Amino acid sequence: GKMCYYFSKSKSEGKGLSKDLLGGKGANLADMTSIGLPVPPGFTITTEVCDLYYKSGRKMPDGLMDEVRKHVGSLEKELGKKFGDDKNPLLVSVRSGAKLSMPGMMNTILNLGLNDVSTAGLANATGNERFAYDAYRRLINMFGDVVMGVDHEHYEHIFDGIKKKYKAKLDTDVPAEGLIELCKAYKEVYRKYTGNDFPQDPYAQLEAAIGAVFKSWMGDKAVKYREVENIRGLLGTAVNVQSMVYGNMGDDSGTGVAFTRDPNTGKNEFFGEFLINAQGEDVVAGIRTPQPVAEMPKWNKAIHKQLLEIKKILEEHYKDMQDIEFTIEKGVLFMLQTRNGKRTGTAAVKMAVDMVKEKLITEEQGVMRIPAGDLSQLLLPSLDTKALETAREGGKVLTIGLPASPGAAVGKLAFTAEEAVERAASGEKVILCRKETSPEDVAGMHSAAGILTSTGGMTSHAAVVARGWGRCCVVGAGEMTIDEKAKKMMIKGKTYGAGDVITINGTTGEVFAGAMATQEPKLGGDFATVMKWSDKYRTLNIRTNADSPEDSSRAREFGAEGIGLCRTEHMFFGEDRIAAMREMILATELDARKAALAKLLPIQREDFTGIFTAMKGLPVTIRLLDPPLHEFVPHDAKTQEELAKQMGVKPAVIKARVAQLHESNPMLGHRGCRLSVTYPEILEMQVRAIIEAAIVCKGKKIDARPEIMIPLVGTAAELAMLRKLTEETIETVKAEHKFKGTLDVLVGTMIEIPRAALTADKVAEYADFFSFGTNDLTQMTFGISRDDINSFLPDYMKKDLFLADPFQTLDQSGVGQLVEIGVKKGRSTKKDLKIGICGEHGGDPASIEFCHRAGLDYVSCSPFRVPIARLAAAQAAL
Ligand code: ADP
Ligand code: MG
Ligand code: MG
């Protein structure tokens, strides 16, 4: 097929063709050409050719160079120049360009086509010897570096010598004779490190450069980038061969990069930098300090004006903010690149709202434009963009773990939960730094500004708990080792102690040395506008996972329409109750257990009263106790002794009971509704607390709407039995309190065991609602423990066995099928069965889209993800 697509004022062969074929850069060069913008002509070699290159064992496909020569011929004719000519040579750039821009793929080669003869010709033709040799030295350098792998430093070293010799401070101060000398020296460097002379045949240069672009597609950096960004299924990179324009011809020339709007704030202001008498990457390479584009009118008013016009044309064409690259040759502007610009979450929101106001896009397009997940940047403190850049460039990144819970936190290291609580109480900001966290650490986690663990995955205890609070958290930072006793943490041979400050970035997983500036969230007008739009278009309801009045209120402020999951076991970790809870679990006799439950009842009642009050008028789904019991019991001798004293038994009794409770596989053990089957009194106590709390609220004219959810049901019979017990308890409590009014109480179940999904028609007979517990459902469907997945997930991702962590984004084709079966069968029994989802997936935009399609009534997620879910639900509906 056709391998090259020509673009120029006279014809734009690639017009309207896809980025899949031409790459992003190539497609947009064709686009810009066809809408009449000044683009130097050239041609694009397609991504299919790159694919062919690899399929034929890294060989240049047959016929490619013939087609290339033909297209170079067209350029020669169009521009009246000749490739390699000794009078007026045509020069080209060779630029990589995949469908998505990939930093670190390959550096562009400029001025290709120069050799000893054509450089002299270029000097003659332009009457500018200095410029010609400046271009040549760049080519020898770039070609050596990019195509032949000669270390850039070898060149730099020599350039420094020449600058010194000519007493030049800047590269632009070096006179022509210095550059001629430099080119000679560069050619020697080239020969020394490649064993060959710098190629004088321009087509040999071109062929080698095209091959280098193809090779770079599989270069380490590019492969790694695609891995990290989860980019799959692309054919390869395109190659753009484009005639050169020169920003280095003197003080009337220059080059620059800009955004059509401010990518940090979203403000509708042309934003960027330019450098006079410079070429290519000089602007970003920091060779000299560029000037902001706002200063450009002082240098060349007309060009500035032209750029502003182009900004308008481009935004109208692409209906989005553009990131552009341009060059000015002797006062004439050329466009070299455009693409949709990357932006912060804040900027995305502002731009969407502004562009709708400007009637550039519709409200629906505005909704679709904002990556829902990026809203988290608006809801949490984040690292200052500048500070972040500086820290990254300054090598301050100690290590990178998993971005478990977004936001940023700065603090001194604390190595135990108790220490975190104490130091936080005395006003210190601490980062709790642990191998992993367990329920016993909850108080310390809550006191800490952020949480950092060396093990664990995205659904580990630390991750789930932190996300629930919107607390910044990085988990699984495997390069870090922790010595809890010595209060020390080691990363890559360096040691950090309790006095050391670190900064963690929960949005990326980065861990930095030292304190970094953060910025507070602003939930201003634009954010509210986007939320209003979202609510207009979505059909899914959004609930929250919350188990305290504070979380409930916050979620309500964020727009939650109810609680989809109130986990009661989290309630038992508080200082005032953990002891009673342990007593209850360790009790071997019914009486002892009932005594402990009696202590817990008023505490629970109060918990529920608080939550019902915060959520008045909205449904509150309360899941009955579902802990692996062993999490609650003390495993160390000292705590066991204390507890024994408290309970008035011998330590040996405790020890024996702890041993008895030990399970080889607690995730599949005595938990969920199985607890209530063995110990119905636990269910009775919890249902009693719920109903009494509802009655208390009714007395205060607070509309409490409890939904009792029975977890981990595998058979309809389990639910039938426990539903009956629940209903009996409700009646008993009502009678005891002589309650005559109506209480709207629903009794439903969590669908989290595959068998429950498969038999959902039967289960539905006893359920007023279903809620898919997709954490457990995923765990049980895959047969992968969510606490242990991180030891092999990285390999699974690297080897393409998993495209995503199934605990983060719902596995639609497998686990999703169980959800679909559950919905279909459940509603075959009860047409209007209310169905939601309450796993971690409830806050993941891709999973929300699935839930919408599957016909769920609501998704439930942690409070800080509620706005994200609202937006994602609207995007799913559009
Ligand atoms: P990247 O993808 O890394 O941005 P580019 O291919 O866009 O690499 O090239 C980098 C820079 O090189 C451009 O911004 C531009 O300044 C310069 N450049 C590329 N092609 C040409 C050309 N034909 N004429 C002048 N400068 C060019
Ligand atoms: Mg570029
Ligand atoms: Mg569960």
Image (cartoon, grey):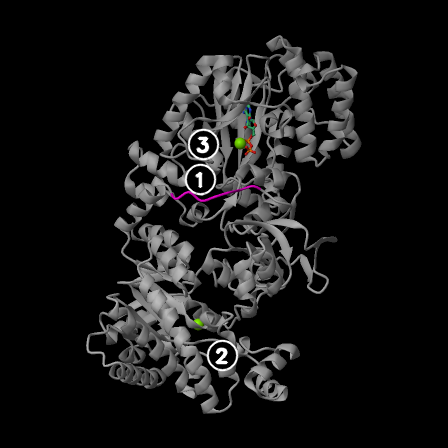
| Distance (Cα) linking label 2 and label 3 | 56 Å
Identity of the amino acid at label 3? Asp
Residue 124 is left or right of residue 505, and the answer is right
Q: Residue at x 37, y 41 (%)?
A: 524
Residue that label 1 marks: 19
Residue 453 inside the magenta-drawn segment: no
Is 520 within the magenta?
Answer: yes
Q: What element carries label 2?
A: helix
Residue 580, labelled with which disc?
2
Disc on the earlier residue, 1 or 3: 1
Mark 1 and mark 2 residues within 8 Å of each other at the beta carbon: no
Percent coordinates x, y for residue 181 in the rendering? 76, 17
User: Is the residue under label 3 in contact with that under label 2 (CB below 8 Å)?
Assistant: no
Q: Height in image: 621 above or below 644?
A: above
Q: Which of the four quarters of the rendered structure image does ligand 1 lie in?
A: top right
Tag on residue 262?
3
Spatial separation of the CA atoms under disc 1 and disc 2: 63 Å
